[in-house]
Image (tube, grey):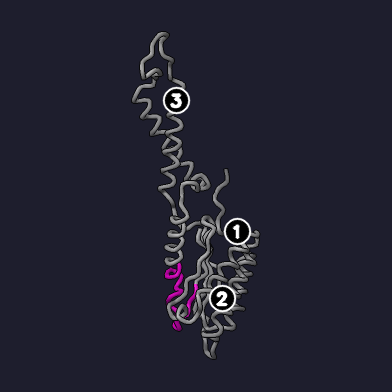
Amino acid sequence: MIHMTKASDIFDADSREKIRLAVIEAEKTTGGEIVPVAATASGRYDRAEDIFGFVVSLVGLSAAWLVCARLPEEGNWAVNSMATQLPLWAALLILLVLFSIGAALASRFPALRLPFITRTEMNAEVERAAAAAFHNFRAHGTASRVGVLIYVSLYERTARVIADDSVADKVAPEAWAEVVALITDGMAKGSPVEGMTSAITRCAVALSGPFPRLDGDVDELSNELRIVD
């Protein structure tokens, strides 16, 4: 089993520098602020951990029941033809211990809880985390109100773009869909940095028309890739 890959592992110091330079270059053509963010995961998914623990406990209890089962006596055709010598207290203890172990394993090895997380739940967590990042990294608070957040969540394998209302009014949603497609294509091909830098460049193209860079424009936000491990 493999531990969850951290965003800081995917985007090392050299990768982050390439992305920083891409943001600087992109913002030469627009007054907008482009804020790239890479998150290890967007949600905790505690419910999925509990479900995995419950499944482990049921499988363990079933195995213990079979081990302790005894065949019916010869000539006995009772409906309950197979009894067990497993006492109730032992069954309850097995459930409790194995549930705790299963939940702990799912917490330590996130791949174990994936089968118990729906895509709808993942999308909701990504939307929530991206919106939080949009505010936490001040993409909404620029003087010109032209902030755009590019958000990548590794565990969910999902990317999102969030823009200020003034940007959303002047840039078609199709442009942001292209930005997302560049990121996801880069991630799928094992080239996350190329995907991110291409997305940043495409973002600048979308912004430069309605929001060109003007004399006196100030770079208000850091150009660094924000890492959320």
The residue to which callout 1 is attached is 10
**Image point 46% across, 50% down: which residue?**
117
Specify the label residue 212 is tagged with: none
Observer-nearest of 127 and 109: 127
Please state which of the two labelled residues, at mark 1 or mark 3, is closer to the viewer.
Answer: 3
Q: CA distance from mark 1 to mark 2?
A: 22 Å
| CB under 8 Å between discs 3 and 2 | no
Q: Which residues are magenta?
A: 133-148
Observer-nearest of 69 and 34: 69
**Image point 43% across, 34% down: which residue?**
57
Outermost residue, left direction? 88
Q: Main secondary structure of the magenta part?
A: loop
Outermost residue, bottom direction? 215
Q: Image height check: is 158 above or below 116?
A: below
The residue to which callout 2 is attached is 203
Residue 198 image point, x, y percent: 62, 71
